[in-house]
Amino acid sequence: MSARLINKIAMLILWLTGFFIIALLCVFLGYILYKGVPVLSVHFIFGKSSDILAGGGVGAQLFNSFYMLFLSLLISVPVALGAGIYLAEYARNNVVTKIIRLSTESLATVPSIVLGLFGMIVFVNMAGLGFSILSGTFTLVLLNLPLLVRVTEESIKLVPQAYREASLAIGATKWQTIYKVVLPSALAGIITGIILTAGRALGETAILIFTAGTTVSRYMFDTDVMAAGETLAVHLWYLMSVGLVPDRGLIADGIGALLIIMILLFNLVLTIPLRIIQKRMGIIK
Amino acid sequence: MEKDFNHQRKLIYDRYVRYLFIACAALMTIIIFSIIFFVGKQGLMTFHDVSPIEFFLTDKWNPSINKYGALSFILGSVAVTMLAIVIGTPLGLLGAVFMSKIAPRKLRNIMRPAVDLYVAIPSVVYGYIGLTVLIPLVRNLFDVNMGYGIFVTAVILSVMILPTIISISEDALDGVPKPLEEASLALGATYWQTLYKVVVPAAAPGILTAVVLAMARAVGETMAVQMVIGNTPLLPKSLFTPTATLTSDIVIEMGNTPFGSPWGNALFLMALVLLVVSLLMILLIKRISARRYA
C-alpha cells in the first residue's frame, strides 16, 4: 500500500472516531431522556417515595440532593478560594508548596468510595453524627475541595499580570489588589468552575451511601441536618440493587432523565453566559 | 494621624489574610493525611485476625466462617481496569488526535463540551445503561446465560475513562511545537506519517499521564461497576461470568457489617489498597511529568 493511501485511510478513521464520540454521547443522552421524560410529572418530581407500593415520587430525594449540595458548597467554596488564592498568588517554589500541590492532586484522585468510608469512620462514627445530611455534607466537601481549588487557581492565573502591576503601582496592598482587581476579573471563571463541580457532586453516589444513608426523613422537605439524606442518585442505585417497589424500572428511568436534565442545565445553560462574559473581558480566547 | 492609622490597619489586614490563605491550603494536606491515617488504621486492624498471606493470596471469601481471602476482588479490579484501558486508550487517543490536529475549529468547539458532558454523567446512570441495555445485548449477541461480568464492566468503564484520556492527551498534543510538524511535512512525509512518527511520540509523556489517570479512575469507579459485575466473590471463569471487584464488594457488604468487626475491617483494608494504588499513581504521574520537555 502506498503511503498516500494509508494516509487517506487513517484520516477516514480519525474522522469516524470523532463522529463516533459525539454520536455515542447523543445516543446515550437521547436514550435516557426518551425512556425517562414520559415518567416525569409533578407528582413524580415532588411526590413522596414509597417503600413497597408503586407510584412513589422522588420529591424528598430531589430536595436532599440540592440541600446537601448547597451546604457542602457553603463550606468548600470559601476554603477552596483561600487555598486557590494562596497557590496562585503567594506560593513560592518551595517544599511546602510542592506538598500542598501533591496533596490536592492526591485528594482529587482518591476513589470516592474511599472518601465515603473515611466519612463513615470520622463523621458517622467518631463524631457521632450517624447517617445524616450533615455527615453527607462534610464528606461531599472532601470531594468538592480539590476540584474547586484547581479551578480557582487556574482562573486566577489567567488574569493578566499587568492588572496586578497597575494596582500595586498606585499603592494598593497585595490583599487590596487580590480583592479588588484579581478576584473580580477571575470571577466568571471561578463561578463556571463552581457550577461544573456542583453538577459533578449532584450525581455522586458512592460517597453518600455510607454517610448520608439510603433512607429519607418521614417529613417532606425536612431541613433538619441530622435527618437521613438519601439523594436522587443514591435512590436510583438503591432501587436497582435492593429496591422492592414493583415499578422500580419506571422510577429509575425517571431519575435518570431528571439527573441528565440537571446535568445539561448545569453544564450548558448556566455556563454559556459566563463563558461569553469571559470572552468579552478578554480573559479567554 | 487618622490616615496613618488607616494605613497601618490595611497593612495588618494584608498580613493576616495571608495566614488565612496558608491555613486553607494546609487543610488539603491535613485532609489527605487524615484519610491515610484513619482508613489505614481501621484497615490494618484486619491483620489481628487475618494473615496478610491469606488476605492477598487466597480467594476464599466467606465471612461467616472467617475466611477473608481478597484475591478474587484484587484480580477482578485489575482485570476490568486493564481491559477498559485496552478498549478505551486507542479510541480516546484517536479522538484526541482528531480534536487537536484535524477537526475544524467549529467542530472542535462542539466536541470540547461534549467530552466534558461524558464526565458529568453520573456513574449510576452509566451503570443503569449497562444494566438495562448492554447486558441484554451481550446475552443475545454472545449467547451467554447472565451477561454480568468483566466484559460488560470493562466496556462501560472504557466509556467512562474516555474524557480523561481525550482531554489530557489533547492538551499534550496541542503542546507539541508546530515546527516539528512542519519539518516532517517538508521532508515529504504524509500527514498521517507526521502524526504517527513525530507528533504522537513528542506528546508521549502527556499521553502516558492521561492513561495513568484513566487507570486511577477505572480502579476507583464503584457504582457503575457494582451494577454490572454480578457481585459474586469468585475468580471469573470467563469474561461473561459474574465476579466482583474491590469497590463493588465494599458497596455490597459494608451495609450489613458491624463497624469494627474483622469483616468490616477487611473491607476497610480493601479501601486502603485502593487508596495506596491511587496515591502510587499520582507519584508515577509526577515522575512522568518531571521528564517531559515538550
Image: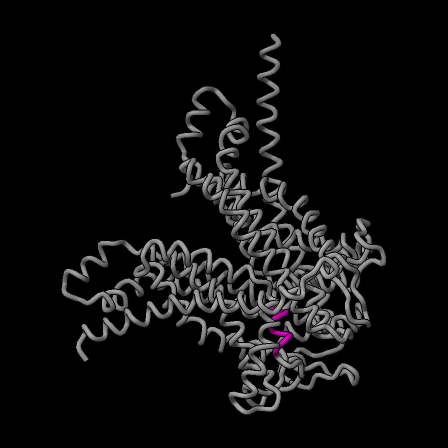
Q: Residue at x 57, y 51 (%)?
A: A266
Q: Residue A52's image quarter?
A: bottom right
Observer-nearest of B44 and A191: A191
Residue A247: x and y in percent read 73, 73
In magenta stretch: residue A264: no
**Picture layout, residue B55 above or below residue B21:** below
- Tell me the residue at 55%/59% (across/down): B120
Q: Which residues are magenta?
A: B221-228
| Residue A248 placement, left or right of B97 | right
Q: Position of residue B32 (x, y in %)?
A: 62, 55
Report whether residue A32 is seen.
yes
* In the image: residue B253, left or right of residue A226: left
The picture places residue B258, in percent across and down from the top left corner, at: 81, 71
Q: Check residue B225 for magenta coloring.
A: yes
Residue B248 versus residue B234 in the image, above or below: above
Query: Does residue B268 appear in this view?
Result: no
Instruction: Pick the quarter of the image with the C terminus of chain A.
Output: top left
Residue A117 appears left or right of B128: right
Residue A272 location (% of width, % of height): 49, 46
Residue at the image position 58 percent from the left and 73 percent from the top: B129
- In terms of depth relative to the viewer, which is nearer, A16 or A155? A16
Identify the main secondary structure in magenta: helix
Residue B154 or residue A120, whichever sits in front: B154
Q: Can you say which quadrant of the picture contains the N terminus of chain A?
A: bottom left
Of all residues, the one furthest to the left in this rendering is B187
Q: Residue at x 67, y 83 (%)?
A: B233
